[in-house]
Amino acid sequence: MSEGIEKVKDRLKRAAAALEKANIDYAVIGGNAVAAWVSRVDDPVVRNTRDVDLLVRRSDMDALTRALSDAGSIHKKASIMGRKGHIEMFLDGPGAKARDRVHLIFAGEKVREDSLEPSPEVEQVDPSNPDFKLLDLAALVTMKLTSFRDKDRVHLRDMIEIGQLDSSWLEKIPHALRARLQELLDDPEG
């Protein structure tokens, strides 16, 4: 188990280093971002994640592909059932499975046609994170409320449990997402 966790951390470090070296803006999102934020309050509550999710600009795709390919990653596009288009990912070398990936989300775009909010801009990062460019907490919470899948609700409940999110956040998020946060605040156990 610890080897799998270390592989994800290593993949994140290599991807971040490649993008930093190429001067490409990005922000770590998803489970790794939640882990970074939760660990600031209560380290034992941190959950592991299987992949690396990055927020990037679509206009940087060519430079990003070169940077990650030079770092040993293999670019792949994959169709997702029920979605138009495809997702962009970089596999962790030859023979890697889709779970061994860096998954890209594009800044300022809706992930799904029916998403209530578009993804945040890549500049919305927390400047105090020393290891990588981390999406700021308000933007991350907005993303998690927009997706609102089971794992997103679990991540948000973890933040509620440790006091990182509370009713004061209802005024900090887009109006369209407030009912979702209120639902979680009213029933934090799910």
Image: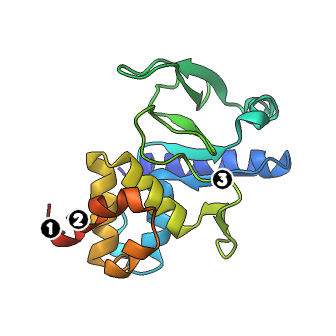
Residue that mark 1 sits on: 187
30 sits left or right of 105 in the view? left
| 117 horizontally vs 187: left or right | right
Residue contact at pointers 2 and 1, CB within 8 angstroms: yes
Residue type highlighted by circle 1: Asp
Mark 3 lies on residue: 121
The x, y position of residue 125, in whole percent, is 65, 64
Disc 1 to disc 3, how far (Cα)? Answer: 30 Å
Using the rendered view, name the quadrant where residue 135 is placed.
Answer: bottom right
What's the residue type where badge 2 is placed? Leu
Q: Secondary structure at mark 3?
A: loop
Q: Is residue 42 visible?
A: yes
Residue type at mark 3: give it: Glu
Q: Nearer the viewer, residue 169 or 15?
A: 169
10 Å crowding of disc 1: few (<14), some (14-19), many (20+): few
Q: Which residue has dot 2 on it?
A: 184
Residue shown at 23%/71% (left/top)? 185
As measured in the structure, the alpha-carbon distance from the residue carrying label 2 to the one carrying label 1 is 5 Å
- Position of 78 with respect to 133 (left or right) is left
Q: Is residue 45 left or right of residue 143?
A: left
Q: Residue at x 26, y 76 (%)?
A: 161
Question: Which comes before the other along the chain, label 2 or label 3?
Answer: 3
State which quarter of the image contains the C terminus.
bottom left
Image position of 122 with respect to 91: above or below: below
Pinpoint residue 80: horizontal percent, then vertical percent: 42, 22
